[in-house]
Image (cartoon, rainbow, N blue to C red):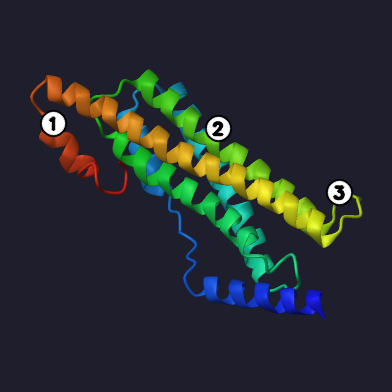
Amino acid sequence: MKRWIMTVCLALCGFMYEAHAQWTVIDPSNLTQNIRNVIQSSTTASNMVKSLQESVKIYQQSKAYYDALKSVSNLVKDARKVKMTIEMVSEITDIYVSGFNKMVSDPNFTVDELAAISAGYARLLEEGGALVTELKTVVTGGNGLSLSDKERMEVIDQVYNRMLQYRNLTRYFTRKTISVSYIRSRDKGDAGRVLALYGSPNERYW
């Protein structure tokens, strides 16, 4: 009876959260074109586009798993943190694509710096994708181990907390990167241009 009540409560939590959850639709085509337009070195541009494509691939795989997860209902798969963990991959990807698209058009960054920034974002999303794979293995029992519901929920909590760290690190990485541009523009007496590009410090990318 206790387990049945817990199952119902989790299902209700999942349903209530579902009404608010949104999976960001990513369109990297503009960023790809901007990279090619701004970066003169074909090798550097190709590497950055390849990095973006790999990141979008991770995003798409995570979205496919998320969509499949919504059609299943049981104690573990209705857990709110499972959904939140996967949705953070969408958020990380959105921060990467949207934020980096602005950075590519920012003259305060050199080509080498943009390549390093792109690699940093790709690494963060790669780590997030690895966590989704780990989560999927635990939830579906694909690791060949017999885990109790309590043990599975403990692992889910661990994966969720690690994904939260990557999401927060992505935000921090973006803020620090933009702050470099702001300082450079301020020193040139052109801070307004950075604020116009990224918004005020209280807005999304800060």
How far apart marks 1 and 2 lie (CA) works out to: 30 Å
Q: Please tell me which of labels 1 and 2 falls first in the chain.
A: 2
Which residue does the numbered mark 1 point to in the structure image? Answer: 191
The circle drawn on residue 143 is 3
Circles 3 and 2: CB distance less than 8 Å? no
Asked which secondary structure carries label 1, the reply is helix
Side of 178 where 71 appears, left or right: right
How far apart marks 3 and 2 lie (CA) works out to: 25 Å
How far apart marks 1 and 3 lie (CA) works out to: 52 Å
The amino acid type, in three-letter code, at marker 3 is: Asn
**Which residue does the image show at 66% across and 47% down from the upper left?**
159
Which residue does the numbered mark 2 point to in the structure image? Answer: 123
Circles 1 and 2: CB distance less than 8 Å? no
Q: Judge by depth and name the residue closer to the eye, 171 or 6.
A: 6
Determine crowd level at label 2: few under 14, some 14-19, many 20+ residues with C-alpha closer than 10 A.
some
x then y, percent, for residue 117: 42, 28
Quarter placement of the C terminus: top left
The circle drawn on residue 100 is none
Task: Say which quarter of the image contains residue 85.
Answer: bottom right
